C-alpha cells in the first residue's frame, strides 16, 4: 500500500511531458508506433490532477480500463482468501478477451493516430 501511495505522489508531482525522470517508450522510439501503454504516465498524471479529459486523451484504453485494473489488483491481493473468485476472474475467456481488446487498441490507435 505504501508503494502505491509513493507512486501516486511521484506521478502527481512530476509531469511526464516535462520531467527527465520518466522513462520513455522504447518500442515507440524504435518503431514510431504507439504501444498499448503509450500515454499511461500522462494519463496517471492527468487523472491525479482531476483532468479527466486530458487523461482520456493520453490513453483512452487505460482510462476506461482503470476501474477494471484496480479490481484485478484487488483480486490478486485477495488470491489466498478468495481462491474461487481468483480462478473465475483469471479464466481463459477473460485472458482471451483482454488480449483481443489490447490488440485492437494497438491497431486502432496507430491507424487513427489516437
Image (spheres, helix red, strand yellow):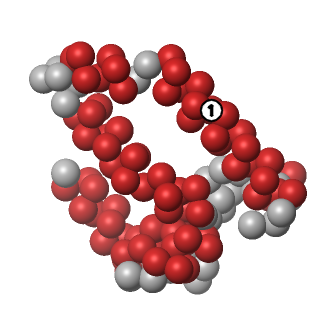
- In the rendered image, the vertical position of residue 104 relative to residue 50, given as above or below: above
**Depth check: 36 or 107 in front?**
107
- In the rendered image, the vertical position of residue 72 relative to residue 95, given as above or below: below
Q: Position of residue 46 (x, y in %)?
A: 47, 77
In this picture, residue 50 sits left or right of residue 25: left
Q: Position of residue 80 (x, y in %)?
A: 17, 20
Q: Where is residue 99 in the image (x, y as percent from the top left)?
A: 62, 32
Q: Can residue 13 be seen in this view?
A: yes
Q: Can residue 20 be seen in this view?
A: no
Q: Splitting the image into 4 quarters, where does residue 71 fall?
A: top left
In this picture, residue 65 sits left or right of residue 32: left
Q: Mark 1 points at which residue?
A: 99
Q: Where is the C terminus found, in terms of image quarters?
A: bottom right
Residue at the image position 26 percent from the left and 54 percent from the top: 3
- In the rendered image, the vertical position of residue 4 relative to residue 57, given as above or below: above
Q: Splitting the image into 4 quarters, where does residue 10 fall?
A: bottom left
In this picture, residue 66 sits left or right of residue 92: left
How many marks the image carries: the answer is 1
Residue at the image position 33 percent from the left and 66 percent from the top: 8
Residue at the image position 33 percent from the left and 48 percent from the top: 70
What secondary structure is marked by label 1? Answer: helix
Q: Splitting the image into 4 quarters, where does residue 100 fall?
A: top right
Q: Where is residue 2 in the image (x, y as percent from the top left)?
A: 19, 55
Is the residue marked by circle 1 packed among few (<14), some (14-19), or many (20+) residues within 10 Å? few
Residue at the image position 25 percent from the left and 40 percent from the top: 74
Amino acid at each position: 500500500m505504501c508503494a502505491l501511495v509513493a507512486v501516486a505522489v511521484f506521478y502527481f508531482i512530476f509531469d511526464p511531458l516535462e520531467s527527465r525522470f520518466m522513462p520513455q517508450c522504447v518500442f515507440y522510439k524504435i518503431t514510431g508506433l504507439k504501444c498499448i501503454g503509450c500515454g499511461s504516465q500522462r494519463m496517471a498524471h492527468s487523472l491525479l490532477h482531476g483532468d479527466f479529459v486530458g487523461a482520456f486523451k493520453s490513453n483512452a484504453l487505460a482510462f476506461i480500463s482503470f476501474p477494471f485494473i484496480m479490481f484485478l489488483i484487488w483480486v490478486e491481493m485477495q488470491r489466498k482468501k478468495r481462491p474461487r473468485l481468483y480462478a473465475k476472474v483469471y479464466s481463459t475467456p477473460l485472458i482471451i478477451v483482454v488480449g483481443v481488446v489490447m490488440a485492437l487498441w494497438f491497431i486502432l490507435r496507430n491507424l487513427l493516430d489516437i
